[in-house]
Amino acid sequence: MSYQATLDRIYAALQPVIGEGKVASYIPELANVAPDQFGMAVVDFAGNVCSVGDATKRFSIQSISKLFALTLAFQREGDSLWTRVGREPSGNPFNSLVQLEREQGIPRNPFINAGALVVTDMLASRSVNAAQSLVDFVRRLSGVADITYNTKVAQSEISTSSRNAAMAHFMKSFGNLHNKVGEVLHAYCHHCAIEMNCVELARAVCFLANHGVNPWTGQAEIDPSSAKRLSALMLTCGTYDTAGDFAFRVGLPAKSGVGGGIVAILPGQCGICVWSPALEESGNSHAGSLALEMFTSLTKQSIF
């Protein structure tokens, strides 16, 4: 099924709101990104691409990387992963310290910063270079060989990572971080600094829409049951502390990042990515959220 006409309609309708909101200025390198950009892509399992706008312009994937890091860690750890990270929505900001103390160093889910730091710690325990291992993984998932991270963005992340460092030290005091805090932060910040475009990201999430099988290699990255469960986590926890409202409006499993990207899946059909750097207060792309809401409304396709 071709979605090109739908994307064209969305792109035209959203022109007045593209750029509304604020870029993630607390990360110095992201403060320089022009807010009035927009791209969207849909990729099916045959590799057919429908796209509009800046869909081939690479951007900082930021917290979208948490989805790929979780998948890679799950491949290596299996269900034992859940002894160190929960599966519940947090209802608090993604960088909150409050719940960590109350819940004795066990992050509420893998998509808040604390949870992603524990997942990165798992990768660091099983890899000589945890930063590069995730780059290699997204290259395989997308079938694109030259994806890498932006060193300037990574350094910008590291230079402003005091709060993440505090969370990491706090979890280490509870025994839930096994490697050196500096090593975990280095890998985590490089994961966030990976740059991809909408087409590449839509390709990279197709394995989840395809019951865990990577369409580009035919390889099962995870089993169908695990694909279902990771997709459920995207739906309940993937769009910061407004995941409930996002599910209400959009009705697709999704993962957002403060670089302005949002990936989503339509199970059994395709991967989707939208990018627009200007954010709502929640940290989700303003135009991107509206685009995905329009997509499911116009196509009458969602998981509900």
Image: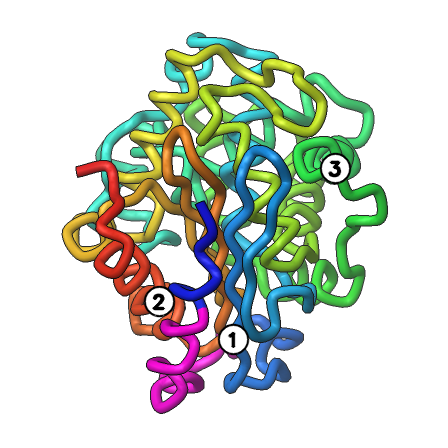
For this view, does 179 lie left or right of residue 165?
A: right
Please identify the dominant SS of the magenta region: loop
Q: Which residue is mark 2?
A: 291
- For label 3, the SS is loop
Task: Look at the image and say whether residue 9 sits in the magenta stretch.
Answer: yes
Rounded to the nearest angstrom, the CA distance separating label 1 from label 2 is: 10 Å
At horizontal 71% and vertical 22% (from top left) the residue drawn is: 217
Of 11 and 159, the residue lying toward us: 11
| Residue 44 coordinates in the image, percent (x, y) | 53, 40
Magenta region, residue range? 8-26
The image quadrant where one finds the N terminus is: top left
Q: Which residue is mark 1?
A: 38
Q: Earlier in the sequence, mark 1 or mark 2?
A: 1
Q: Are marks 1 and 2 in contact (CB under 8 Å)?
A: yes
Q: Which residue is mark 3?
A: 143
Q: Are marks 2 and 3 in contact (CB under 8 Å)?
A: no
| Residue 147 coordinates in the image, percent (x, y) | 78, 49
Crowd class of label 2 (few under 14; some 14 to 19; many from 20; radius 10 Å): many
For this view, does 153 lie left or right of residue 68?
A: right
Q: Is residue 75 above or below residue 157?
A: above
